[in-house]
Amino acid sequence: MHLSPSSPIGIFDSGVGGLTVARAVMERLPRENIVYFGDTARVPYGVKSRETVARFAEQIARFLLAKQVKMLIIACNTMAAVAYDTVRALSPVPVLEVIDAGARTAVARTRNRRIGIIGTPSTIGSGAYVTAIQRYDQSGMFLATEACPLFVPLVEEGWLDHPVTRLTAFEYLTPLLAQNIDTLVLGCTHYPLLKPMLGSVMGQGVRLVDSAEAVSERAEDLLREMKLENPGQGEPEHVFHVTDVPQRFREVGERFLGRSLGTVRVESLC
């Protein structure tokens, strides 16, 4: 497969959350074209079997590869946890994912070697972040995890600093604060929108690791190594594909992206 610097980056997620990854990539790599895919007809993925998630991920990856992307980014934590090997096996282009990037950054940033991880119940239950962090550190770093199921609906409602959201954050995060962590991994693509509020709850002594930012940094490094950075000076093209409810995707998505979505196209993978 011929890779061109002007080819787009493919980013995919089970729905709208991966737009925080798209946003981080747009901000770090403003010249890059992006093709985004959100599987809005089949979300949520967290309640589905590993085999089903892997099959859906393969379908989406093949769709994006047909668009001649030069890189794939798995922006969904559930897909990253269970389908990375499946996607990597079929892809002729580099494949990045949020869990590995977030784990690598957390290990590099912690000072007291005590890391907290928050995410959806399925992501926390998979142990994927713990496994990834242990891959980069073999010497017994202390890890504390907390599932935060209410954050996703609160973010999609737009309650980013609502009293209910802040109270919920105190309930979820107090046990982690008691563990004297100095680094907190935001293990869900919805959570970056809560960063200002989460930072105030955790205090200045705790560094927040945004997996969206971490994977965008890794994408920048990899494109530079491969000499595939887009040299174009014009406006990049960003195209968004969904499998259902495009208007809802646009309404919520523009909050996630911080800008207009532009073209949103409905696709069928069946």
Image: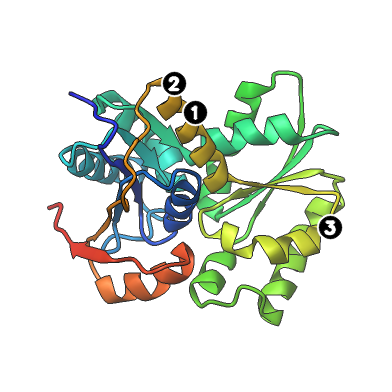
Q: Which residue is mark 3?
A: 203
- For marks 1 and 3 on the same chain, the one whose residue lies earlier in the sequence: 3
Q: Is residue 97 left or right of residue 167?
A: left
Q: Which residue is mark 1?
A: 221
Q: Which residue is mark 2?
A: 225
- Amino acid at dot 1: Asp
In this view of the protein, can residue 127 be seen by the observer? no
- Amino acid at dot 3: Gly
In this view, the mark in front (2 or 3): 2
Query: Decide: marks 1, 3 in contact (CB < 8 A)?
Result: no
Q: How many marks?
A: 3
Query: Decide: marks 2, 1 in contact (CB < 8 A)?
Result: yes
Tell me how far mark 2 sits from mark 1, CA to CA. 6 Å
- Amino acid at dot 2: Glu
Please state which of residues 270 and 72 is positioned toward the viewer in this rendering: 72
The residue most toward the bottom is 163
User: How far from the left and from the top, in percent, is residue 146?
Assistant: 68, 52
User: How far from the left and from the top, in percent, is residue 190?
Assistant: 52, 60
Query: Decide: marks 2, 3 in contact (CB < 8 A)?
Result: no
Identified at 26% across, 71% down, the residue is 246
